[in-house]
Image (cartoon, grey):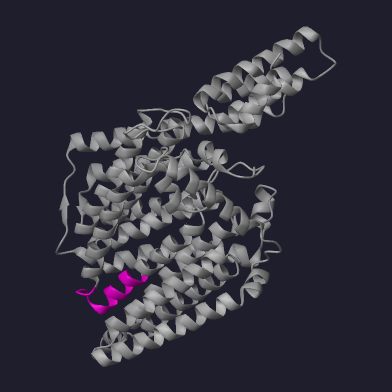
Amino acid sequence: MKGMSLFYKSFFLFLFSFLVFAFGGTQAWTLSTYQVLFSILFVSYFCQRKIYFSPVGKILSFFFAFLILYTLLQTCFPTTLLENPPFYPSSVMPLFGLEHAGLFVLWWSVFVLSACLCRNLKETRLFLLGLCGICGAVALLHMVWPGGYLKFFSGLKDGVGPFLNRNNGGIFLFLGGFTALALWGSFLTQRRQYALQNRRADFYAKQSVWLLLSLLLCFSAVFSRSRGVLLAFWVSGFCFSVLAVCLLLKKTWQKIGAVLGIVLFFGVLLIGGLQAENAIQTFAKRNSSFSADTRVQLYQAAGKAFKERPLFGFGVGSLPVVLPVYMDKPLHLYVARLHSDGLELLLGVGFVGAVPLLLLLLMGILRLLKRLFVLPRHKALLMGGIFCGLTGFVCATMVDFHFYIPACGVFFFILSGLLCGETFWREEGQRKSVRPLVLAAMGLLLAVCLYVPVCKTIAWQLGRLGKGFKFEQKIAYQQKVLSYYPSPRYALELGLSLYHKSLDNQISLAQQKQYRQQAHALAEKYLKKYPKEKELSALFINTLD
């Protein structure tokens, strides 16, 4: 059984490293490949092993269950922006809702499996060493070969290691760095124990490894030049410092004095950071305010949109269809994310969906904090350090979309699962055998949720293949793309190809009219589903006879 346990952990880490180095899972084929392989791992593991649920694990599983069911319920009731807001969950973009439901199922399955893999502190530390080792490889790649990996494999330049965006790469390294820092602090509290066992050399060796690894990851995260990472470091550093003081100091007056000192220190850091905004902008290589201005514009549009449907939202994943309608100035960019994961989810689910999710999340956090102060110091520091790192990550998602970068989101839920595992909840949790019917249902859910990602991957690959052909074959490929993944963006690409061909004076007038009519019919069909889509509306008007 130990051999099989090692196999599952090794395969789990291999899949995670694949996701990380395949551009963070941001391309359709990488994420769908990961989902397929992980689903096989998940089902095969629970065919042989028992599932473990701690009190917090149960609460967060209810969180995921509600989120998934609410999202699926929205997709069952499609609506449009022209209709009055219905008094029940609905979606203006069911296709994207199904895609997000599949992503949420992946997050839940990663969370559950991570909670079950490690049964004691030694196994957890070794597993974390593997995770931090993958992060270390990304950091070395970023420091030793800056931009080289992306340029070699994709032709892009601005990124961190295999991550296409430096903000996402930076937060990934931050999460690994803070985890390594928590492990270093956890080992530090066991110095006396190692000394009594005459294992000082072993202690210093482990301390050196974790300290060097944490420094490498933290420095490389800072030099990703992401302002969101600096925010995450400030939040996590403050929380972890306060937590460490409360855990390590015994006398109340010492705790109060230390906490006041920490508040003063981090307050000075905050004020200094605000005063040195220009220096931070220079360090971040932001030569203009375009990034900040764009975010403000997106948030303002989201606020206007939310006022239209505050109760049930527009449907999870509907942002690309909704947000451009409420923007004062067009962005000439495809708006896929709001650059604020919390606000985007609120816009999708509304108050009715957000309130239960927030309550469940708060229940889980309070239960975890309660457990934190009854654990031995070395376990409490490890658990608290990882929790503080996750807190900083969540704060960074308020100004970016890290959860929707698959490698970052999966990393977050791996660590969340480990916090809910048997290492920290041995006497309060329980392992249960998974009944065949339940396992079959879980496997079926995973299989169903693979449908949209696999179709998207096929469409993406067909789109790439079609670009190298002449017009007729290119159109045939674009039609196949649309049949697999009928998104308005792909419809617009096909419509524009037909429209531009209709302007070609080298073909007959009859052919020009035929192509124009096809483009018009396509625009009309998709405008019935997405009636305020500006580019489709422009195509519709341009192709009127």
Measured as percent of width and height from the top left, residue 91 is found at 41, 33
Q: Is residue 535 above or below residue 511?
A: below
Examine the residues drawn in magenta and state their main secondary structure: helix
Residue 284 part of the magenta segment: no
| Nearer the observer, 24 or 225 | 225
Residue closest to the far right: 506
| Nearer the observer, 425 or 192 | 425
Q: Is residue 53 visible?
A: yes
Measured as percent of width and height from the top left, residue 170 is found at 54, 63
Measured as percent of width and height from the top left, residue 431 is found at 17, 53
Residue closest to the far top: 510
| Residue shown at the point (62%, 27%) measured from the top left | 537
In the image, taking residue 91 as reference, residue 57 lies left or right, namely left
| Residue shown at the point (33%, 91%) measured from the top left | 257
Q: Quadrant of residue 44?
A: top left
In the image, taking residue 359 as reference, residue 147 lies left or right, namely right
- Please state, as top left, top right, bottom left or bottom right, where the C terminus lies in the image: top right
Measured as percent of width and height from the top left, residue 157 is found at 69, 55
Q: Is residue 532 above or below residue 128?
A: above
Residue 377 part of the magenta segment: yes
Range covered by the magenta-colored residues: 373-385
Q: Is residue 474 visible?
A: no
Q: Is residue 229 above or below residue 441?
A: below
In the image, taking residue 362 as reference, residue 39 lies left or right, namely right
| Residue shown at the point (43%, 66%) measured from the top left | 392
In the image, taking residue 245 as reference, residue 15 lies left or right, namely right
| Nearer the observer, 170 or 435 | 170
Q: Is residue 114 above or below residue 311?
A: below
